[in-house]
Image: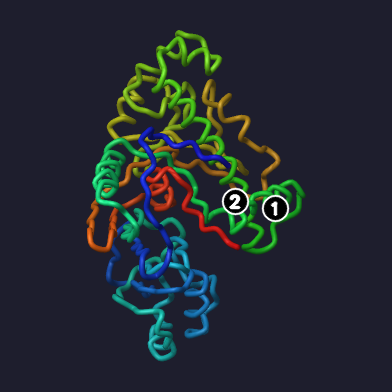
Amino acid sequence: MQKTYAYTHQPINFDFKQTVERFFVEEIPLYHFSGTGNFLILKIKKTDMSTWKLIHVISQATGLEERDIGYAGLKDKNATTIQYISLPKKYEKALEKNLTTERVEILEKTYNKAPIKIGHLKGNRFSIILHGVLPKDAKFFRTTALKMQKEGIPNYYGYQRFGEDSHSFEQGKEIAHSGKKLKGSKEKLLVSAYQSHLFNNWLSMRVKLSSTIAQYPADKAAKKLGYPLELVKVLAQQPQFFKLFLGEMMQAYPYGRITLLEDMMQSATRFAQKKISPTGLLCGANVERSRSDAYHLEEPFDDRDLSTLKGDRRYAWIWPEEVETHYESESKRVTVKFFLPKGSYATTFLEEIGKFSLKPTFA
């Protein structure tokens, strides 16, 4: 897909590579662990190892089935990552005896009454080193990143979601339309890539629509969009960039329940205050669709034949937090640190700043 960026600044040049030396991420748990209970909680630092591989290594060391090892989210192989893992307490000694790989370091141990489950985290804290940044670009990078902390960014899925050739969603679509029950984690991952592809395309359309209203006078924007002039005038009165429509499914931010938008200006004000955010559709079984005008914008990116996976809704707009930058003029390096809510991609934030795709190219 061709992503639509929300911001209108000129591109900022930098060299990005996702490696263990330049990309650091740490999970922030959703809640404090109790310190007592039947589950061992491990704070683990790993390098050059995916979460799936980590779980396999722990399984081999303890004799546990992989399904009995809890984790909150998946982390990439090409990074230095800190994440939390849970397993039954009775396997602690076997782990201490048999876990020998140098790529895994146990930083802390505690206990809890319940295991860690998917999604049990507030978000992730990132520290990323960018090379080849000129002094003027470093200053602009900092200003832009801080602006996005205040005003937010579109919550696109990152390129990592779609495989090396960016077309894994096409396989997912075929599988979803086959009517067959999904076999294993690979097929589920492919179908979820198709869900994500539809979401990204919907979000790109909504960002482009909002950008048109922001950049042009109401009469010209109405003509470009094919909307009634009075509707565009009402949309333009909303204080935030990402425009809301009647029938939006809004969610308390940064987590909470989803409710139907009813009072437009009240919701727009709360959105601008970072108290709620609109959600986009991840089509699938048992998911609630938008209503009214928002549904008509959502419907072209819905696939009701996709019922093999549970559907969901995802924040359309998020706010980076704890943004810091440090520039080394001699080496022309910027270290940027920030926090994002769970499920959001650091590369999406960096792409919105740089205005170019960070996806690596393969010969």
Q: CA distance from mark 1 to mark 2?
A: 9 Å
Count all numbered tags in the image, as a single digit: 2
Dot 1 amino acid type: Gln
The residue drawn where x is 62% and y is 43% is 284
Looking at the picture, tell me which residue is in the foreground, 239 or 96. Answer: 239
Residue 79 makes an appearance in the image: yes
Q: Give above or below for 362 relative to 323.
A: below
Looking at the picture, tell me which residue is in the foreground, 1 or 298. Answer: 1
Disc sitting over residue 171 in the figure: 1
Residue 55 rendering spot, x and y as whole percentages: 49, 74
Q: Quadrant of residue 260?
A: top left
Q: Give above or below for 168 relative to 224.
A: below
In the structure shown, which secondary structural element does the residue marked by tag 1 occupy? helix
Residue 124 rendering spot, x and y as whole percentages: 35, 57
Name the N-terminal-most of marks 1 and 2. 1
**Residue 169 horizontal side relative to residue 16, left or right:** right
Q: Quadrant of residue 306?
A: top right
Looking at the picture, tell me which residue is in the foreground, 159 or 328. Answer: 328
Answer yes or no: do the residues labelled 1 and 2 have beta carbons within 8 Å?
yes
Disc sitting over residue 60 in the figure: none
The residue drawn where x is 43% and y is 61% is 17
Looking at the picture, tell me which residue is in the foreground, 187 or 207. Answer: 207
Dot 2 amino acid type: Ala
User: What quarter of the picture does the C terminus occupy?
Assistant: bottom right
The residue drawn where x is 38% and y is 73% is 39
Residue under label 2, please give it. Answer: 193
In the structure shown, which secondary structural element does the residue marked by tag 2 occupy? helix
Q: Residue furthest bottom?
A: 97
